[in-house]
Image: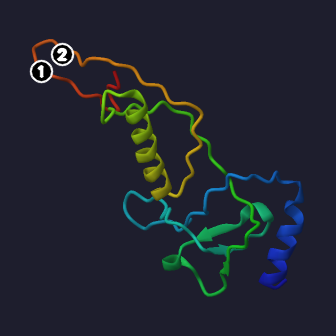
Amino acid sequence: MDEKKSVQTAVTDISHVPAVAIAPPPRCYHRLESPAGGICGELARWLRPGRDWFAVSYFCDAHRLDGDQLVPVEHVFRRVRVLADLLITGVATNAPLAQTEAVARLEAAIRAAGGVLDVHGVRSYMVRSAAVPGGGLAFATSDAPE
């Protein structure tokens, strides 16, 4: 079966997959050969058909192969939703200004990573930093978030 027919078959077979309006761009699946491994993850423009509609892979310009095809407007992808609390210091003590700037900064970072920010709410509180025993100020880290 030629690749064009493979993509057409895949489009036909995806009719039962839910369509979404918030669709982040596809990202490159190229596996890196570094000691740590990993995935390229850059924005992708190319599709590599798999054996089935759910085995399609996407690739950036740098990692595409000759047989890869441009990603069509309608394509299947796995959309990942991460539920998390993000804590960021406001740029001002004024709540609307601090919250608006924080969301804009986060949206830019998420877009640069190939994602789409879907804000469900924003809250902020006036707080004070607490000195740690023995003096000094402690900043949150992934090992000690509070």
The residue beneath circle 2 is: 132
Horizontal side of 81 relative to 93 (left or right) equals right
Q: Residue at x 66, y 85 (%)?
A: 67
Report how far apart the C-alphas of labels 2 and 1 lie in the structure: 6 Å
Q: Quadrant of residue 129?
A: top left
Quarter of the picture holding the N terminus: bottom right
25 over 129 or under it: above or below: below
Please count the marks in the image.
Answer: 2
Q: Quadrant of residue 12?
A: bottom right
Task: Check disc 2 and give the amino acid type.
Answer: Val
**In what element is the residue under mark 2?**
loop
Could you say where residue 111 lies in the image, as x and y percent from the top left? Answer: 50, 55
Question: Residue 18 at what x, y percent from top left?
Answer: 82, 51
> Are the residues at dot 2 and dot 1 in contact (C-beta closer than 8 Å)?
yes
Q: Residue furthest top?
A: 133
Residue that carries the numbered disc 1 in the rendered image: 136
* CA neighbours of label 2 inside 10 A, class few (<14), some (14 to 19), many (20+): few
- Residue, x 35% and y 33% (percent of image)? 142
Closer to us: 36 or 72: 72
- The answer to whether residue 61 is left or right of residue 9 is left
- The amino acid type of the residue labelled 1 equals Gly
Name the foreground residue: 87 vs 45: 87
Residue at horizontal 50%, vertical 62%? Answer: 41
Q: Would residue 43 be found to the left or right of residue 7 on screen?
A: left
